[in-house]
Image (cartoon, helix red, strand yellow):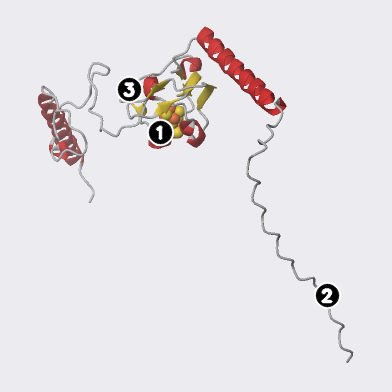
Amino acid sequence: MKRTYFENIRAGIVSTVVGLSLTVRHLWAARRRRSELYVTDPNYFAQDTGMVTLTYPHEQLPLPDNARYQLHNEMDDCIVCDKCAKICPVDCIDIEPIRSSEEIGKASDGSSIRLYAAKFDIDMAKCCFCGLCTTVCPTECLTMTHEYDFSSFDVGEMLFPFANLTAAQATEKRALWDQYQLEKEAFKRNELAKPAASPPADAPAPPVADAPAKRPVFRPGIKPKT
Ligand code: SF4
Ligand code: SF4
């Protein structure tokens, strides 16, 4: 339908007034904020008015309990089993274990700790937040925290070290393990070098094992001529 010149002017004015009234209505509603509800809350979609912008980082949206963000390792409970590093699909966990000749502690679940961690680095720049490492961890010391704002201008700062040994302590523990290995080898050599002890004269003769039954010898028969 073709409008006249004055009908166009009228439609323009009506459209402007409707648009402005919407703007004013939202400005009025923006005097108050929407409450911070997580998306699973039944009232989440009931809040159709109110200000939504958060003044981050002073305000943050609530996070679900199973949110996957920065990893944390509680080293006192880590048994340095390497399972997390093995299952990581992007190889962002780097562990250097040092063996110990004896138990060095117990994790809070009672697991025995027999390895030191000279290095336990997690490169969060590579991590794809799959959570597999936290699933396989036998002592549940590796967890995903709610910390998600760890951005940095330097990618090197994304490497999070968790090892609780200093370089000097690691060198000392390595030397202790090497020393233990040398002593073990020397002990083995001494044991092998000792002459075998001869049995006393009045000792009963060892029982003679039954001779093994003779196996029948296979003799192929002569193939009948056809
Ligand atoms: S969350 Fe996934 S990618 Fe990140 S360290 Fe664990 S296993 Fe590797
Ligand atoms: S799986 Fe757990 S206990 Fe094993 S090395 Fe990784 S963090 Fe430590």
Side of 100 where 4 appears, left or right: left
For mark 3, does the 10 Å Cα neighbourhood hold few (<14), some (14 to 19), or many (20 or more) residues? few
* Label 1 lies in ligand 2 vicinity (Cβ under 8 Å): yes
For mark 1, does the 10 Å Cα neighbourhood hold few (<14), some (14 to 19), or many (20 or more) residues? some
Q: Is residue 168 visible?
A: yes
Q: Amino acid at mark 1?
A: Cys
4 and 108: which is toward the camera: 108
For mark 2, does the 10 Å Cα neighbourhood hold few (<14), some (14 to 19), or many (20 or more) residues? few
The answer for how far apart the CA atoms under marks 2 and 3 are is 81 Å
Q: For mark 2, what is the residue?
A: 219
Q: Residue at x 56, y 14 (%)?
A: 176
Give coordinates of residue 160: x percent, y percent: 44, 18
SS of the residue at dot 3? loop
Q: For mark 1, what is the residue?
A: 137
Q: For mark 3, what is the residue?
A: 147
Question: Considering only order in the chain, which callout, 1 or 2, is on the residue closer to the N terminus?
Answer: 1
Q: Is residue 130 visible?
A: no
Q: Residue at x 54, y 10 (%)?
A: 172
Q: Amino acid at mark 3?
A: Glu
The mark lying in front, picked from 2 and 3, is 2
